[in-house]
Image (cartoon, grey):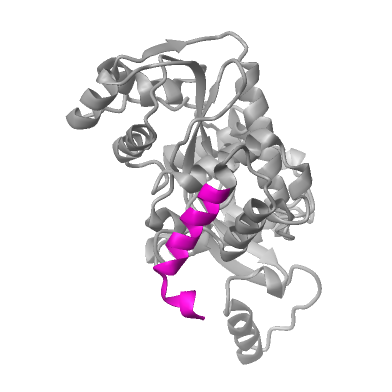
Amino acid sequence: MGRMGFHQAIALYIGREGVNSLRRSNAVIPGFEDFEDLISQHCLQLEFGNSDDLFPGLADEVRAFKKEYGIRVGGKNAFPQFVRYQKYRFPVPLDNDADIISLDEAVQVCIKLAEKLDTSTPEELGIGMMDPGTSQVPLFSISDGTLIEGGMVPIPELEEEKYEPVIFRNEVAAHSLRKAEKYGSYSCELLRLREPIQNDPDEVPFFPLFCLIVDVDDAAPLPAPLSKDCGEDMEAFLNGLAQEWIDNGICPSEIFCRDDRTYAFLKDFCSKTGIRLEYTSEELPELDEAEDSFLSFMDEYDDGTDEGFSGKDEELDPLMLEIIALSVLGSSDEELDQMPEEAMEGILSMSASGMFPDDMNKKIRDRLFKYLAGKDEWDD
């Protein structure tokens, strides 16, 4: 990896899951799926970067290793690190012996292959850019220190992900929503947050799911939680959504969705609560508007300046402000524990300035002050 100039690495995709994640990353899919495909990578990598690109403390280890073995390597991208990429999780250092052996074998082949490229072109060896249409790749191995060319071998096509319906077993919540007064038509889609979170300091940070559901007529959002994991426990995530609606005294009369994952998420839930669910191929402009607003907000927050919560507040889309407000008001203390301190300070500043809709400004301040009052650092 490295032709694009910003990420140099040897990547090893193992088995069907690995190849499938490589296929997804090469598929051109517009919208939020681009990001989700990127973070669904399942591979091992030997990355080369600068000292500040490494995991904390690793740069000193690399320097000590070079000094001990008399290795003189300098310049750009001179620091290696071994990394595991897992689906919807933040990359972590490689620490599994079997994976280290597998990646070492791949590196040894690449070293021999580099020597071979001194006298042959990549095209002569069958090496080319991977794209969605690639059906075969060259096979190489090492025997007694010699690179063996094994010809071209087929690789599987992209296997589309299948989503089993999420079973809604909370009979008490189902009864409550089934008897509730229903109103409004909404469009819904499951998206993945672009900022990783973690439930405790020892957990690998992950990218949670977010249920975006907006009014068909005016794109006004309904409150919805974040998933507390990568999406492995979709039933718990669905229970959280039901509880949000019960706590806020709301229940849609009908919901439209346009993708298999969202439909599988809501099918059993809607059946048991009396909500009409329709899978549609029609345009859902209100959902596109909400997604664009949400994406723009996350991009502003992710630019390293935190201006999404401060300097650009006056430019925030009203829809995004309403989504933020409902997320804060519907969050438990445990969910607020995951919010960055800068984000909470920014939201408090925004509410003090009267930026949120209607009477939400005071409610947001009351909610956050109540939360902070229960924290140890409040006295500080």
Q: Nearer the viewer, residue 269 or 182?
A: 182
Q: Nearer the viewer, residue 344 or 225?
A: 344
Measured as percent of width and height from the top left, residue 234 is found at: 34, 36
Q: Which residue: 43% across, 60% down? A: 99
* Residue 154 seen in render: yes
Measured as percent of width and height from the top left, residue 88 is found at: 49, 46
Measured as percent of width and height from the top left, residue 44 is found at: 52, 55
Q: Which residue: 49% across, 55% down? A: 366
Relative to 25, does residue 260 appear above or below in the rendering? Answer: above
Q: Which residue: 55% across, 21% down? A: 215
Relative to 308, does residue 359 appear above or below in the rendering? Answer: above
Relative to 185, does residue 223 appear above or below in the rendering? Answer: below
In the image, residue 51 lies in the stretch drawn in magenta: no
In the image, residue 369 lies in the stretch drawn in magenta: yes
Q: Nearer the viewer, residue 313 or 234?
A: 313
Residue 370, by quadrant, is bottom left
